[in-house]
Image (spheres, rainbow, N blue to C red):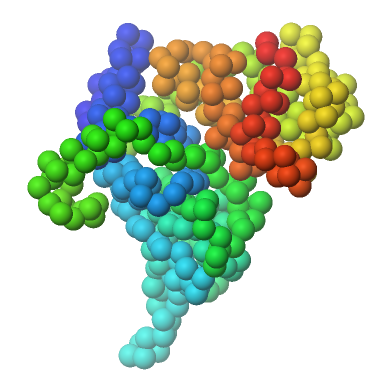
């Protein structure tokens, strides 16, 4: 996509055209799933990784492949299994008999877009190898560290209903994911459209290969740079920043006696903590979110305002991205599990307790 010169008058229009073009291209293969599509674009603009959770058959793999197609970036899919080794992911050193030296064979992680399929099936050693790639954007093979392509984008999937042969993801790794998106079942109308789309492909194959409608690379490097610059220009008031910190701080049971701190508006950010204590909410939370969650809320709320066509962040933007940002960063207690509460229910209740600026 050719991006015109940046001017005050056409900047907002260009951003809207880029986002509309992305959604139009993805709609050629993906029916519905607007929350997932917006989450994928949001993470790509923010430069973060995504954890996709949903039962099989909800187009998680197809969505990731389609995202790579509209960006024109290199794409690799890695099927995680219990017998996977770190070298299968990052690469290894191979002895060359002719030259008498070792040569580097780079693994599939050396791509712009990585699909880590069923990530919770890999053991701890593989998870730790992926951790360096996600956080540092580099991998170490032998004694040498190699940078990964830029941008580098990991989209991991996991099945919430299957637990045999799986490993619980470490909290340190979960915290590296910018968002956790829950993929829902389509509505009946959307499922009918899926059948019509399959029929229009004139094939019996359901593979996301050449049978599918080709997508145009509408989100190239120039367009992505424009979107990131537009997100950086979105204004966030100091009161909204204090609200973000208040929400994250209120998720921590250890913050029951916070130090005195006032926002620029004079409101105590700790009011939410005090209300949570009175409501007994902390009996449902074992561990709260880290400062990395505040950074993620800060970035994603600005991008959400950009999606809405506004040049400033509102409290509603923070609330809209709070669930995907926080749901994988909070560890619930056994009492919450006994009462059938999931992270979304606890976070939603938390948002009602924190004063809105």
Residue 77 in the figure: left or right of residue 199? right
Depth check: give the residue in front, 140 or 193. 193
Q: Residue at x 49, y 53 (%)?
A: 159
- Can the viewer see residue 294? no
Where is residue 244? Give x, y as percent.
66, 24
Where is residue 294? Give x, y as percent.
65, 31
Q: Quadrant of the N terminus?
A: top left
| 236 lies above or below 120 | above
Residue positioned most to the left: 202
Residue 30 in the figure: left or right of residue 284? left
What is the quadrant of residue 167 in the picture? bottom right
- Can the viewer see residue 97? yes
Depth check: give the residue in front, 159 or 251. 159
Where is residue 97? Give x, y as percent.
36, 91
What is the quadrant of residue 296 in the picture? top right
Where is residue 314? Give x, y as percent.
56, 14
Q: Residue at x 55, y 72 (%)?
A: 143
Residue 313 in the figure: left or right of residue 197? right
Q: Quadrant of the C terminus?
A: top right
Residue 256 in the figure: left or right of residue 53? right
Count of marks, rendered view: 0
Q: Residue at x 40, y 67 (%)?
A: 107
Q: Residue at x 22, y 53 (%)?
A: 206
């Amino acid at each position: 996509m050719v991006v015109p010169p940046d001017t005050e008058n056409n900047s907002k229009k260009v951003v809207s055209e880029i986002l509309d073009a992305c959604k139009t291209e993805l709609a050629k293969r993906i029916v519905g799933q607007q929350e997932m599509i917006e989450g994928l674009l949001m993470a790509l603009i923010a430069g973060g990784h995504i954890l996709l959770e949903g039962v099989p058959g909800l187009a998680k793999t197809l969505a990731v492949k389609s995202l790579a197609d509209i960006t024109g970036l290199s794409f690799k899919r890695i099927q995680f299994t219990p017998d996977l080794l770190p070298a299968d992911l990052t690469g290894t050193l191979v002895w060359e008999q002719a030259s008498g030296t070792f040569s580097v064979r780079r693994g599939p992680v050396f791509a712009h877009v990585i699909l880590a399929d069923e990530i919770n099936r890999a053991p701890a050693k593989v998870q730790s190898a992926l951790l360096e790639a996600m956080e540092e954007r580099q991998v170490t093979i032998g004694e040498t560290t190699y940078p990964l392509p830029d941008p580098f984008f990991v989209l991991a999937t996991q099945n919430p209903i299957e637990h045999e042969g799986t490993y619980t993801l470490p909290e340190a790794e979960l915290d590296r994911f910018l968002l956790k998106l829950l993929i829902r079942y389509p509505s009946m109308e959307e499922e009918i459209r899926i059948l019509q789309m399959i029929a229009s492909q004139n094939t019996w194959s359901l593979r996301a290969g050449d049978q599918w409608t080709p997508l145009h690379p509408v989100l190239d490097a120039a367009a992505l740079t424009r979107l990131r610059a537009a997100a950086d220009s979105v204004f966030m008031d100091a009161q909204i920043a204090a609200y973000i910190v208040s929400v994250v701080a209120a998720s921590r049971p250890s913050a029951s006696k916070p130090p005195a701190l006032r926002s620029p508006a004079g409101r105590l950010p700790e009011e939410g903590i005090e209300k949570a204590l009175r409501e007994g909410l902390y009996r449902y939370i074992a561990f709260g979110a880290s400062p990395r969650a505040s950074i993620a809320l800060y970035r994603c709320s600005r991008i959400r305002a950009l999606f809405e066509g506004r040049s400033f962040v509102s409290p509603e933007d923070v609330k809209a991205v709070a669930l995907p940002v926080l749901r994988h960063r909070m560890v619930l207690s056994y009492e919450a599990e006994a009462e059938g509460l999931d992270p979304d229910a606890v976070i939603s209740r938390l948002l009602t307790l924190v004063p809105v600026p």
